[in-house]
Image (tube, helix red, strand yellow):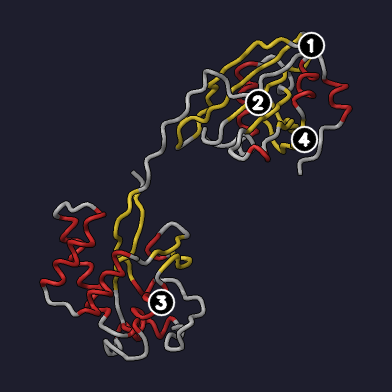
Amino acid sequence: MTPPLPAEFLTKHAAVRTRTVDDHMFAVDQIGHPPATFRLQLFTAPGAQPVAVVTQEEDEGQSLSNAAEQYAAEVWRRHCAESAQPPIWIEHQLLPDKQWEQMLVVVFTTTGPFQLKEPDWKAITELQVAELVGAPVDPGRGEGYRPRPPKPKPQKFYRVRWVAAFPGPKPYRAECMPDLTGWQRLARQLRPRPPARQCCWYHGGDWRRVCSTAIRLVRRAERAGVPYEDIRQAVLDDARTEGMSEWELDALNTLLADPIVLGHTGRWPAFAHASYANGQHRSQAMLEAGVRRTITLDWRSP
């Protein structure tokens, strides 16, 4: 819970001010991203510290809290450069869950002209904001707000990954699936286990053939321009034509209809998997069988 604004703050700073700026799309450049935007209402009076009331929707770049120092310094530089102190900064982040929406006063440490650090937040009510500037303040985003176009959805695609680089498993429910050390993983690559065992479905067939077939047929479909959503059926049709067994077709279908999904960390996704979102039992069976590469699901930003 954000602490409330001390009563002495209003006593010190309240004054009758005039709204001199109402920029519904105030923009601040951000390296590597589109400019961040918010509504800026600036209230000024002779001899009084300016008051900036800024309002932002959820998807307008970095939030008001995360970039408070940058945003306040930019408003100070553009609109209050003659002032020795930054404007009193009041931020209003509009959120889908109105329960947590509130107005906040942010007090900074000033280290030089247009240089701010160490923001400290205090809760302020609309009535207190009106007392601070001497008139009611519109808390909304403003009629001049122009929402950003919806972001394109990431596109699914099948990615080939090295099985030996898969993450370690969580404890398995199947007794026939003990975890493998790094040396055991390497040994399975050099001397694969027999392709089939009778203990469970996961060990019931040749994952090496299934995975190599999946990679080959998926790539063939992609080269032919088959859309992602149609690749599974095209691959299964080709695999039946090649005479794959029922278990192999079933396993092939799971790779494409219920694919392995890995969580990522780090810069190099092929060697930076952190966890399984889906498919750890199949992955473990592949590791034991000495499978080198397999098909997984990934997303590509448009």
Identify whether 226 is placed above or below 121: below
Question: Which label lies toward us, 2 or 4?
Answer: 4
Residue 119: x %, y % from top left: 72, 36
Residue 147: x %, y % from top left: 47, 28
- Which residue is tagged 2? 114
Report, in whole angstroms, how far the alpha carbon at label 1 lies from the one at label 2: 25 Å
Report, in whole angstroms, how far the alpha carbon at label 2 lies from the one at label 3: 56 Å
Residue sitting at the far left: 241
Q: Tell me the amino acid under the disc marked 3.
A: His
Q: Tell me the amino acid under the disc marked 2.
A: Phe
Tell me what residue is drawn at x 36 percent, y 76 percent. 282
Given contact means CB atoms under 8 Å apart, are the residues at marks 1 and 3 in contact?
no
Q: Tell me the amino acid under the disc marked 4.
A: Lys
Quadrant containing the C terminus is top left
Of callouts 1 and 3, which one flags the residue occurring earlier in the amino acid sequence? 1
Of callouts 3 and 4, which one flags the residue occurring earlier in the amino acid sequence? 4
Report, in whole angstroms, how far the alpha carbon at label 1 lies from the one at label 4: 22 Å
Residue 269: x %, y % from top left: 40, 60
Disc 1 packing (10 Å; few <14; some 14–19; many ≥20): some
**Relative depth, front residue between 292 and 143:** 143
- Which residue is tagged 4? 122
Q: Is residue 74 left or right of residue 164?
A: right
Q: Tell me the amino acid under the disc marked 1.
A: Val
Report, in whole angstroms, how far the alpha carbon at label 1 lies from the one at label 3: 69 Å
Question: Which label lies toward us, 3 or 4?
Answer: 3
Tell me what residue is drawn at x 76 percent, y 44 percent. 1
Report, in whole angstroms, how far the alpha carbon at label 2 lies from the one at label 4: 22 Å
Disc 2 packing (10 Å; few <14; some 14–19; many ≥20): many
Tell me what residue is drawn at x 28 percent, y 88 percent. 196
The numbered dot on residue 16 is 1
